[in-house]
Image: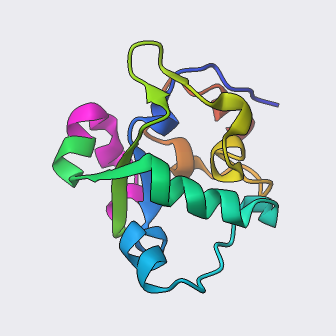
Amino acid sequence: MGSCTGCGGCCYPVVLPRHISKAHLKAEPGFRFVAPGGADADRCKQWVLEDLTRISRAEALRRRPALAMNPLANSGQFFYECRQYDVETRKCRDYENRPSICSGFPWYGLGPVAETIVDLPDCGYREDLG
């Protein structure tokens, strides 16, 4: 079973589907965030609204060029930077309190899917792909 190597690739930038955008969450106050594992939907919603700042696709690709290879990142996703991510150390400033959308990466209990980490060559979870 793979484990996190601390490469920081999954955090720089953060890639989320369009239905989890700040605009959508603000426009739909009753939206129930379906968090991986369902454990902390409110914490995930708070994280998106308070800790993420949207960046352009071009900026996301500048930060992580290999992202262009990821089919999931090229299917109508939004890109963000997280204020909890420290670029210098490549670590989360609030690791112990991160939401399940972060702690569940990359499989979220569903099993390995190559597309999730195709653009993360240093990800320790690659060994789960067999």
Quarter location, residue 94? top right
Q: Kindly identify the residue that appears in the image at 75 percent across and 29 percent down.
A: 2
Q: In this view, does 21 lie above or below 69?
A: below
Q: What residue do we see at 59% from left, 20% from top? A: 6
| Picture quadrant of residue 128 | top right
Q: In this view, does 68 lie above or below 92?
A: below
Q: In this view, does 99 lie above or below 38?
A: above
Whether residue 49 is visible to the viewer of this picture, yes or no, is yes
Along the line of sight, the residue nearer the viewer: 129 or 95: 95
Q: Which of 42 and 34 is in front in this view?
A: 42
Q: Main secondary structure of the magenta part?
A: helix
| Residue 42 picture location, percent across and down | 69, 65
* Image: magenta residue range: 61-74
Q: In this view, does 77 lie to the left or right of 59?
A: right
Q: Quadrant of the C terminus?
A: top right
Asked if residue 127 can be seen in this view, the reply is no
Q: Residue 11, image x and y in percent?
A: 48, 37
- What residue is shown at x 53% (from left), y 42% (from top)? 117
Q: Where is residue 97 in the image (x, y as percent from the top left)?
A: 71, 38
Q: Quadrant of the N terminus?
A: top right
At x 60%, y 86%, the residue is 30
Quadrant in the rendering for residue 98: top right
| Magenta stretch contains residue 79 | no
Residue 65 in the image, given as x and y percentages of width and height: 27, 35
**Front one among 84 and 100:** 84
Farthest residue toward the top?
A: 89
